[in-house]
Image (cartoon, rainbow, N blue to C red):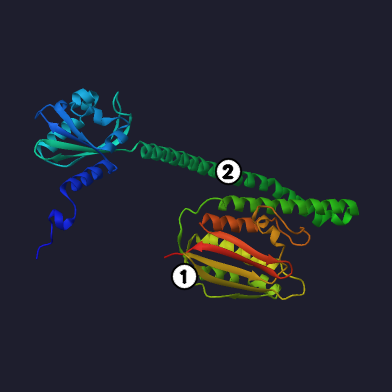
Amino acid sequence: MEAPNDEAALGVGAEEQLAMLRSLVDKTPLGLIVYRVESDTDPGRLRLVLANEHAGVAAGTDIKRLIGQTMREAYPSYIETGQPQRVLDEVWHARKTIDLGTLVYGDETIQRGVYQASAFPVFERYVCIAYSNITAQYELQARLDAKAIALEHANRALERSNASLAQFAYIASHDLQEPLRKIRAFGDRIQASQRARLEPKYADYLDRMVNAAGRMSTLISDLLMYSRVHSSPSSLDAVDPSTILTSVVDDLEISITEAQATVSVDPVPGRVLGDQTRLRQLFQNLLSNALKFRREGVVPEISVSAALDRGYLAITVRDNGIGFDPRYADRIFKPFQRLHTRAEYPGTGIGLAVCHEIAVRHGGSLSVESKPGEGSAFTVRLKEAR
């Protein structure tokens, strides 16, 4: 049995169907203009015979007042774009649907803007041009492109600046180290041969000078190290953190023994994307800090654990050391920031800044949780290698 399709069965009369169709055409978000072809060769004689409501909205004009006019009468400059000739040749003669592309256009009749258009044949001697005004999208994309170009230029300028700063830091460090080496060398000679003959006051001056030169040398070395990690690694490979941690613990064997510490490293599930040399430096700094900042009279206990977390590998170095006030959690990752005096704990205050910079340059992060007298837990998040 065939499905009913007469007006009575559908409950919609011919006039109502026609009204619905007209409403549908008028409300479509495309401008639709139907032309009658009155010449096989002259696109200027395409005559406008029908247009929907959105045709006027998109063009910013009352398009229906132009009905009955030829294209040469309504908007002659449009003929010069070449699109009407394509409509005649490819749509009318070849009976094809074509994409007219994007056109920046405007005249006395049509609001200037960016239009996206296509054309297709209708009945025997009619063609239809469908178009939309994409000026807003075009301008938005142009602004985004301009911002992207500006950002790219800024990034390149920043890369050049960082490279220049790194080069400057290296040269400055090298040039500063040379006179310091001489100061230390001559100071050591005087201490070895003449210190006993000096008055206590001058012997103290000499000791301070040699110690200050030593601290300055260490500070310059640390500054040089910080400048070297202040750039993204040239390449990231799949690296096994377990191998790095095992190697670091082996290297710290003497320090671990002297501190009578226990260090446990849990299995690390998977690998990370990173530079092995820099990651080694990161973990060595974290473990060295855990050994350094221990509580007097308490056996240091250091543990390393790891867990996968949404595409990242979170590796935590936990200790039972002196800890610190959580208010300083951000401060300790800045260069040359110290929470204790040099007499209490030696160092320049750059180790954790280096760790933080390495983590960030790997697309990860470094955070800490701590309580005074209870210890600290440093967690580095690195991208998982898949």
Q: Mark 1, residues whose alpha carbon is within 10 Å: few (<14), some, or many (≥20)?
A: some
Viewer-proximal residue among 319 and 228: 319
Relative to residue 224, is residue 97 drawn left or right?
A: left
Which numbered marker is on residue 215?
Answer: none
Which numbered marker is on residue 270?
Answer: 1
Q: Position of residue 289 (x, y in %)?
A: 67, 65
Q: Measuring 18% from the left and 28% from the top, which residue is drawn there?
A: 68
Q: Secondary structure at mark 1?
A: loop
Count the numbered circles shown. 2
Q: CA distance from mark 1 to mark 2?
A: 36 Å
Relative to residue 314, is residue 210 drawn left or right?
A: right
Q: Position of residue 301 (x, y in %)?
A: 67, 75
Q: Are marks 1 and 2 in contact (CB under 8 Å)?
A: no
Residue carrying label 2: 165
Quarter of the picture containing the C terminus is bottom left
Viewer-proximal residue among 220 and 322: 322
Callout 2 amino acid: Leu
Q: Is residue 116 visible?
A: no
Q: Secondary structure at mark 2?
A: helix
Q: Position of residue 265 (x, y in %)?
A: 57, 74
Whether residue 166 is situated above or below residue 85 in the rendered picture: below
For marks 1 and 2, the one nearer the N-term is: 2
Whether residue 68 is situated above or below residue 20 in the rendered picture: above
Q: Nearer the viewer, mark 1 or mark 2?
A: 1
Q: Is residue 65 visible?
A: yes
Viewer-proximal residue among 224 and 294: 294
Whether residue 200 is situated above or below residue 142 in the rendered picture: below
Quarter of the picture containing the N terminus is bottom left
